[in-house]
Image (cartoon, rainbow, N blue to C red):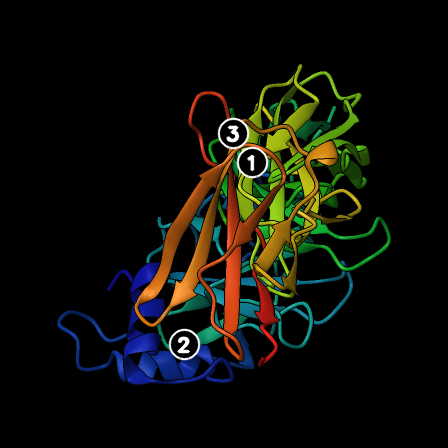
């Protein structure tokens, strides 16, 4: 019966046996198979058989070592056992059993019954590992010959080499790009990219790049002004990693600087003109002027300006209203700066005053600080405010009042084009009883 290594391994795995099971146990498992029974192997007494000659082993294969030898033609040869050691003169363990005189080739892939190179080692041979081999014949009654072939040494393919010429492309918006040279080793099937927030910190895998010639990778969705360090290691078809590159630094593009020197350029009734210094970055796309009214925590956009505009007007202020302004810059990639330092403003008021006189209530406001054509005078009544007069000038006498009455007035200024300013603050007055 010819018992190939793969058949032996399959029988052992199917039986649920562990790595400590010996080859004689494997033979017992197969006694029920069709054909001649595999003998129960034993060392004593040894068989008087010649040692196999011409043992050849092949180095440089990926996690496997092929063996070949010449058949033993004389004597009662039923097959061969293949043995492996980590040292030339160390303890040899059986790793394979072949059940035919002329079956003289074997591939060691590590899936065998022999102890591994180190506790916890995987089932394969590993990368760049060196082993020693010998072969002995056994007789049909299971006795193994004492004479063994010559001892031959072989080494598996080394771990992939370190990738060369790692380049990191910084100052991109929200991303950092990497490139490196492809590795000539044909066993390489891809690469692993590692990243760390510091050069000497813990590098964690962030990507697996498939293909020996796929030598670029882009780290996306990064925040502005983020700094990372990257390493790249090659991976072979068996999953073995080589030595990674040294850490290479990358940084994303920062957001624009906050605009500087925000200030009030001029001020009028219901109008504030603000100015600021232009940003120095070459890719600025524009600015936004923001306003917060009173103690409100919400900001609203007053104006959006182009890259060459550094002044803006706010025409939506009430008389005497308290507001705070900030300005932000944004670039062509959509990155927005932090806000500028705030500027707090109290909007210009009418200076509206009211006093009770003998003939009525006299209203006056401040025309010297306000440019207007006329004014609407409104008095609040039971059903809301109503216009009681439209005048040119800066005062008005309301004669339609009663002694002991209380009144509330508001003034709205009008421009030459009829456009209304925002209403004044209201003023209350009490007419003395007669």
Mark 3 or mark 2: which comes first in sequence? 2
Which residue position holds label 3?
Answer: 212
Left or right of residue 204: residue 406: left
Q: CA distance from mark 3 to mark 2?
A: 49 Å
Observer-nearest of 321 and 134: 321
Left or right of residue 15: residue 228: right
Q: Quadrant of the C terminus?
A: bottom right
Label 2 with label 1: CB-CB less than 8 Å = no
In the image, residue 239 sits, relative to residue 415, either above or below, namely below
- Residue occupying image coordinates x 48% and y 48%: 377
In the image, residue 270 sits, relative to residue 305, either above or below, namely below
Q: Residues within 10 Å of mark 3 (few under 14, many from 20)?
A: many
Residue 59 x, y percent position in the rendering:
62, 39
- Total number of numbered labels? 3
**Under tag 3, what secondary structure?**
loop
The quadrant in which residue 83 appears is: bottom right
Residue 166 x, y percent position in the rendering:
72, 28
Label 3 with label 2: CB-CB less than 8 Å = no
Q: CA distance from mark 3 to mark 1?
A: 64 Å
Q: Residues within 10 Å of mark 2 (few under 14, many from 20)?
A: many
Which residue position holds label 1?
Answer: 315
Q: CA distance from mark 2 to mark 1?
A: 106 Å
Which residue position holds label 2?
Answer: 142
| Image mark for residue 159 | none
Residue 334 x, y percent position in the rendering:
55, 32
- Residue occupying image coordinates x 46% and y 76%: 143
Q: Quadrant of the N terminus?
A: bottom left
């Amino acid at each position: 019966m010819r018992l190939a290594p793969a058949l032996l391994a399959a029988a052992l795995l199917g039986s649920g046996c562990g790595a400590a099971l010996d080859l004689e146990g494997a033979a017992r498992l197969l006694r029920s198979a069709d054909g001649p029974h595999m003998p129960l192997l034993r060392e004593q007494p040894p068989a008087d058989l010649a040692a196999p000659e011409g043992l050849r082993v092949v180095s440089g294969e990926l996690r496997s070592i092929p063996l070949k030898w010449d058949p033993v033609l004389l004597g009662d040869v039923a097959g061969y056992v293949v043995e492996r050691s980590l040292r030339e003169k160390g303890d040899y363990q059986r790793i394979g059993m072949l059940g035919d005189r002329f079956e003289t080739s074997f591939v060691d892939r590590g899936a065998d019954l022999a102890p591994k190179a180190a506790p916890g080692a995987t089932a394969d041979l590993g990368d760049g590992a060196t082993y020693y081999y010998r072969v002995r014949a056994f007789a049909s009654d299971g006795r193994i010959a004492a004479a063994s072939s010559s001892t031959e040494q072989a080494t598996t393919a080394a771990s992939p080499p370190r990738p060369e010429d790692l380049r990191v492309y910084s100052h991109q918006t929200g991303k950092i790009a990497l490139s490196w040279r492809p590795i000539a080793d044909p066993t390489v099937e891809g690469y692993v990219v590692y990243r760390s927030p510091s050069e000497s910190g813990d590098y964690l895998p962030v990507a697996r790049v498939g293909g020996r010639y796929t030598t670029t990778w882009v780290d996306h969705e990064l925040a502005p002004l983020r700094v990372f360090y990257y390493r790249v290691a090659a991976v072979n078809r068996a999953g073995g990693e080589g030595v990674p590159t040294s850490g290479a630094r990358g940084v994303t593009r920062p957001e624009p600087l906050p605009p500087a020197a925000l200030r009030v350029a001029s001020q009028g009734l219901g109008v504030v003109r603000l100015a600021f210094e232009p940003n120095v970055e070459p890719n600025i796309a524009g600015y936004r002027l923001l306003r917060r009214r009173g103690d409100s925590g919400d900001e609203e956009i007053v104006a959006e300006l182009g890259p060459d505009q550094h002044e803006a007007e706010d025409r939506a202020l009430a008389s005497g209203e308290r507001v705070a302004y900030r300005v932000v810059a944004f670039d062509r990639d959509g990155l927005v700066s932090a806000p500028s330092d705030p500027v707090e403003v109290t909007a210009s008021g009418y200076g509206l005053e009211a006093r009770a006189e003998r003939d009525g209530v006299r209203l006056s406001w401040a025309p010297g600080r306000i440019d207007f054509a006329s004014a609407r005078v409104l008095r609040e009544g039971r059903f809301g405010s109503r216009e009681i007069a439209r005048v040119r000038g800066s005062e008005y006498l309301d004669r339609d009042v009663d002694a002991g009455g209380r009144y509330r007035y508001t003034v709205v200024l009008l421009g030459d084009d009829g456009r209304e300013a925002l209403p004044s603050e209201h003023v209350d007055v009490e007419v003395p009883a007669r």
